[in-house]
Image (cartoon, rainbow, N blue to C red):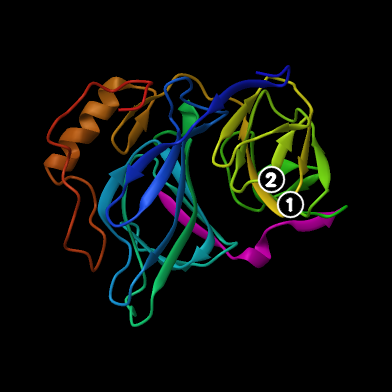
């Protein structure tokens, strides 16, 4: 590792039923970066006509899911009555709080091939907000701070950075930034928060002149200010913020309490979660339960 990189995380490939995801968090070496407890790079995947993404209704507690697409369209439905398509550059933020159920599917019109490429993250909620009322909000791309500086194009998905603030409501100090660099361009990332990481969506990214292999998450040392540069058209994501404390993860549940996760398991089995309107399918609780842990299952 360099003086600025604490951990270098390689992806774990997950099959999500018809397409692959590269999972960076949680990992064997690190569970969270700031409040981010889950980081999936979805696709890129191409589905032939008639096919698409069909993630059946499933539950969450004590976290927020954040969906951000590079390409393709997804239709979100949830148990608070939201029905929303998300397109590239927009943000779907869903706060699970005390409990929510949602599905994610390709739109119903599947006469043409479908594409999916993007990032899905989970953000752990602070103790005082874990059991908040569930809600969902959509922010079109035009709502987000987008700017260009010296050949680098930025989109601030959530949080605060570079004297800008995203309108996406959050519950703790956070940064979630999309940066696209032209060949030979660079920018300095200050140590905005105590925990920061850089994900290389493409090839061509370097951190302090050290090449960062594609699909790697470089977790920075606390307080480190780094130079991010590109030797080709390149793209990276910056995630981080302030930690919210010890969290456990089991399946789709995240909580500061093991007992709360056990309760959520029983509630799902017993049908106590609210249903998603117009949905009849659901994902059952995994048959082989494991104890909730700070490590990936």
Image-based side of 287 in relation to 65, left or right = left
83, 161: nearer the viewer: 161
First to last magenta residue range: 133-149
Question: Quick check: 72 above or below 151?
Answer: below
Residue 191: which quarter of the image? top right
Whether label 1 touches label 2, CB < 8 Å = yes
39, 282: nearer the viewer: 39
Image-based side of 119 in relation to 292, left or right = right
Q: What residue does disc 1 label?
A: 232
Give the numbered dot on residue 204: 2
Quarter holding the C terminus? Answer: top left
Q: CA distance from mark 1 to mark 2?
A: 5 Å
Residue 13 rendering spot, x and y as whole percentages:
38, 40
Residue 258: which quarter of the image? top left
205, 240: nearer the viewer: 205
Residue 55: which quarter of the image? bottom left
Residue for point 63% across, 46% down: 203
Asked if residue 147 is among those painted magenta in the image, a careful observer would answer: yes
Residue 32 rendering spot, x and y as whole percentages:
50, 27
Callout 1: SS: loop
Asked if residue 269 is among those painted magenta in the image, a careful observer would answer: no
Residue 94 rendering spot, x and y as whole percentages:
45, 50
Instruction: Answer yes or no: is residue 132 visible.
Output: no
């Amino acid at each position: 590792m360099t003086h600025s990189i604490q951990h270098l995380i390689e992806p774990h490939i997950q099959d999500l039923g018809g397409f692959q995801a590269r999972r960076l968090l949680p990992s064997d070496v690190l569970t969270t970066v700031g409040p981010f407890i889950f980081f999936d790079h979805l696709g890129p995947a191409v589905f032939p006509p008639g096919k698409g993404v069909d993630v059946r209704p499933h539950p969450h507690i004590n976290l927020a899911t954040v969906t951000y697409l590079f390409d393709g369209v997804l239709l979100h439905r949830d148990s608070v009555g939201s029905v929303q398509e998300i397109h590239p550059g927009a943000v779907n933020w869903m706060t699970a709080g005390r409990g929510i159920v949602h599905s994610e599917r390709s739109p119903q019109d599947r006469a043409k091939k479908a594409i999916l490429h993007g990032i899905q993250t989970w953000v752990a909620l602070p103790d005082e907000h874990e059991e908040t009322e569930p809600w969902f909000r959509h922010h079109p791309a035009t709502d987000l701070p987008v700017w260009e500086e010296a050949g680098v194009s930025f989109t601030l998905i959530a949080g605060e950075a570079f004297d800008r603030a995203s309108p996406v409501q959050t519950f703790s100090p956070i940064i979630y930034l999309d940066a696209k660099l032209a060949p030979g361009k660079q920018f300095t990332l200050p140590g905005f928060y105590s925990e920061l990481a850089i994900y290389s969506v493409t090839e061509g990214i370097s951190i302090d002149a050290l090449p960062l292999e594609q699909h790697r998450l470089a977790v920075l040392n606390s307080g480190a200010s780094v130079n991010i540069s590109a030797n080709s058209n390149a793209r990276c994501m910056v995630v981080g913020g302030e930690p919210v404390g010890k969290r456990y993860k089991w399946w789709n549940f995240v909580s500061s309490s093991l007992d709360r996760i056990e309760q959520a398991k029983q509630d799902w089995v017993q049908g106590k979660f609210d249903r998603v309107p117009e949905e009849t399918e659901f994902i059952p609780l995994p048959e082989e339960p494991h104890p909730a842990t700070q490590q990936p299952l």
